[in-house]
Amino acid sequence: MNIYTSILNHPHYMNEEDRDWVDEDQFNWLPGFDQNEDSDGEYGLSNENNIKLFLDIEQKAKVGFQNAMVSLKPLFESHYFNNVFISIDLIGLLVNGNTLACYNFRDSDPQFGNYYFDIGWRQINSEAKDYVWEHELLHLLDHRLIDRISIYRGSKEIIDIYRYYLLKYREEGFAELYYLLKGKYDNIDNIDKAVDIFRQNITNLKNQIDAESVLDEKILKSYDFYELGPWIMLDLLRTHACNSYEELINETLEKLYSKQIIEESKIQEIIKAALNIDHYFYLEYCTKLIDNKNEKK
């Protein structure tokens, strides 16, 4: 597997004309950046200190990817890797300030083993959230589903938009499973709370669809796909997968609640099971949640 890392607007990747529109102020905030001119007294971005800084950043990105691949190696045993391209965005052209990294599924081609990622500075330095590379690699593993549900995003049909935002919990919930199973979670600390909030979110969304012809983007963005999603995936496996994983998930939940370490083999088993949850089965699960709530009233 070849891994290529590159910094956007790196001076070594530009000709003289392109350099004219690159403002050094875009990089001044970067820890360790040297604002002095180069040895020829001209282009500060290409002085020796900055070239070394950029090389170090590219190397950190490569090492981060490789370490995550080692952690998830059993999941990729039958996967073909040819080239991995990692674009490091330090100036906000591809990755905004709130985004650590993203898997570029549109440019990636699993058939030929070519994959693309975009990452920001926060993913390189100490501010990065744990297991971000693992999150993006699970997106890669989930490429087929992400590609398939992307058709809903471009639709103008209200029902397709509804499906797309429900499926974002499936997409991000799967990618965030490794993080949760490593004992990492924030405000949502148990599965029952997650399911209750998720069920209410679906109800709110459905009610808005019934009342309006256009969904309110502010309401849609308020749903926490990352925090609720992995809990929802565990609930689905526990309750709607022919009881095949009920014992495994219940044991896992006990360990999560008591802050015990979950064996790596168990984590891999759960992720493999969750990968098989396609979008039809997932939407059926969401429908049952709504129906069950209505029955209780």
Image (tube, rainbow, N blue to C red):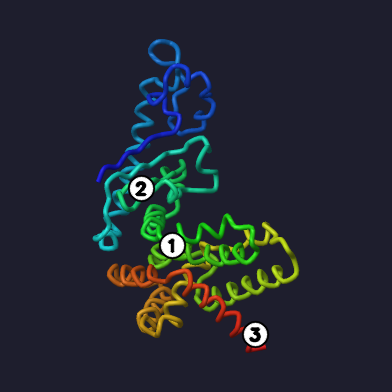
**Spot occupied by residue 250 in the image (x, y as percentages of width and height):** 40, 81
Residue 46 spot, x, y in % from top left: 40, 21
Farthest bottom residue in view: 296
30 lies left or right of 159? left
Residue 145, disc: 1
Looking at the image, do the residues carrying marks 1 and 3 touch, with CB atoms under 8 Å apart? no
Among the 4 quarters of the image, the one containing residue 72 = bottom left
CA–CA distance in space, label 1 to label 3? 30 Å
Return the residue at label 2: 115
> Which three-letter amino acid code belongs to the residue tagged 2?
Tyr
Left or right: where 128 falls relative to 271: right
| SS for dot 3 | helix
What number is the disc on residue 294?
3
- Measure the alpha-carbon separation of dots 2 and 1: 16 Å
Under mark 1, the amino acid is Leu
- Assess disc 3: are there few (<14), some (14-19) or many (≥20) residues with their C-alpha within 10 Å of its C-alpha: few
